[in-house]
Amino acid sequence: MKKISVRTSDGQEFELEENLAMESATIKTSLDAFSRDDIILLPNVNSWEMVKIIEFFTKVQELETKFGVKFMEKKEGRFLEAFQAEFDKDLSDDNLYCLLWTVDYLGIEVLLENLCHLMAERTKNKTVESCRNLFGVQHDYTPEEEAEIREDYSWAFEGPEIEE
Amino acid sequence: MTNRKRLRTSRRTATAAAQSDFFDDLPDDLVVFILCKLSSSASSPSDLINVLITCKRLNRFGLHSLVLSKAGPGAFAIKAKSWSDSAHRFLKLCVSAGNIEACYTLGMIRFYCLQNRGSGASLMAKAAMRCHTRALYSLAVIQFNGSGGSKKEKDLRAGVSLCARAAGLGHIDALRELGHCLQDGYGVRQNVSEGRRLIVQANAQELATVITSATWRSHQYQHFYACLTGLVSCPLLSDFGCNVPGPEVHPANRFMKEWFGSGRWLEGVGLRMCSHVGCGRPETRPHEFRRCSVCGTVNYCSRGCQALDWKLRHKVQCKPIERWLGVDGGGGGDGVDEGGEGENVVVE
């Protein structure tokens, strides 16, 4: 299996198997445009992000061997659970954002979908204020607007909001 | 997801110093994608609504038609006591976005709770046309019972045809219902062996679903193997199937259950509720549902509910009415022929 070399923004080099590298639409385009022997430069990717991505590919191959299903082709719920447990535990919210951006840039559809799912899971069972902190958004409603909107959606909440 | 090759102007570090930049830099379609994941896996409406209240940008994205169209049943798990115009508006918004779960849920609420039969049925039909199996089955139940109209408005053939469609898409109760219709020649030409085959198939599918689910435990394996080796009479061949945990109650059914409560005010107008705890359907005219012919104390909207309730609790509670009166009666729990309104078949 041919190996593709990539160089991240901080000068570190990584080797990826060709079939895994081709999962990234960006790398695939570069490979089609240039020779496969050249090192691909990824100025937008940090080395820790690359490590995470390689970890993901390794995990997927492990699960494919365990369950005997081509994960990339057929996405199944069980894989999502196994993946989440693995990735969720040591990934901070900020790192998750960075990784989301990077994976979107690289165009790895499968990993992007999983990361979005992880992000969605993190927004559940939180108060509105905690959601704001998670997304890092500014509260831009006036007190009257906020009161109106909370009143409008009061049917969705039962009793006081859950504290984290 | 379009490929983005723009260079980041600022290098990010893992510190939270510029946290507000992170989210703002996420492209719009990625935010919408995340919210789609949230709405489709939400276990309660608040999961999604919380996001709508955070800020104007997220409010706009959260109400994006793509996000609303992907909302799963959990997002519509509204509490009956919280029902309001704004809850109704939210459901209508999701219906306009093309969400068939919303069509089904609002259809059920309008038909049974708000008693707006025409609109309710039409919403369910909208979902049914896009292969929503519960909507197909619920419409079949309405046709079999002539719900919302008189006894004359029962359309058995329509009921059978809807059941067949739902069964073809994998709905187990519909398959069981269809099997009984074939056995009894109810709405379709009688074919006892085919009916029997479908009932056993439904039982097998039900068992298979439970086995492959994560909640299956080892002691149930022992029961299953005991069935296979004939140590216990095989429930797979019965009308009701194996003892499996009841399926999860759909938010629409839970809503109806809460709405009608104990059913006391319904009884005041001579109407009963389906005795199966997971159903919640009320009668729309007196004597619409069919009674257990053995004990006469419970009634069901459909055979699906009858089968589930038998397994979950009625099996141990059902006592022939003759015994209550102290009269020696024969024909204990044997099947009785389908009567008119108010009768039911109970087969052991």
Image (cartoon, coloured by chain):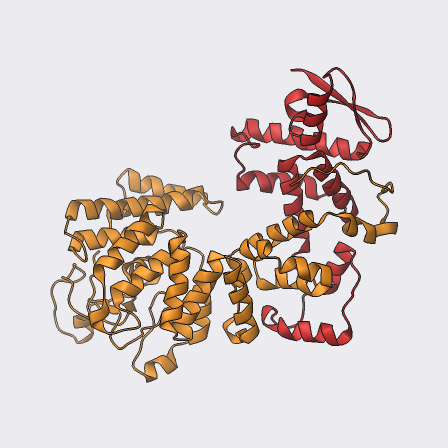
Left or right of residue B12, residue B302 in this image = left
Query: Where, quadrant-wise, is the N terminus of chain B in this rendering?
Result: top right
Q: Answer left or right for B309 relative to A34.
A: left
Relative to residue A116, is residue B170 drawn left or right? left
**What is the x, y in percent for residue B239?**
25, 52
User: Observer-nearest residue: B210 or B15?
Assistant: B15
In the figure, residue B268 lies in which quadrant? Answer: bottom left
Query: In which quadrant will I find the C terminus of chain B?
Result: bottom left
Whether residue A163 is visible here, answered yes or no, is: no
Q: Residue at x 63, y 37 (%)?
A: A109
The percent coordinates of residue B206 (x first, y second) are 36, 47
Residue B221 visible (yes or no): yes
> Image quarter for residue B265?
bottom left
Q: Of all residues shown, which one is farthest toward the front? A: A33
Count of marks overlaid on the render: 0
Letter of the chain shown red in the rendering: A
Residues B24 and B247: in front is B24
Residue B85: percent from left, percent from top: 54, 75
Tell me, what hue is chain B?
orange
Residue drawn 76% across the image and 69% down it: A141
Rendered position, A134 above or below A9: below
Height in image: B102 above or below B264? Answer: above
Q: Position of residue B311 (x, y in %)?
A: 32, 57
Based on the displayed image, in which of its 4 quarters is residue B341 positioned?
bottom left
**Residue B337, above or below A61:** below
Task: Say which residue appears at 58% left-offset and 63% top-offset.
Answer: B45
**Vertically, is A99 above or below B38?**
above
Residue B60 relative to residue B16: left or right: left
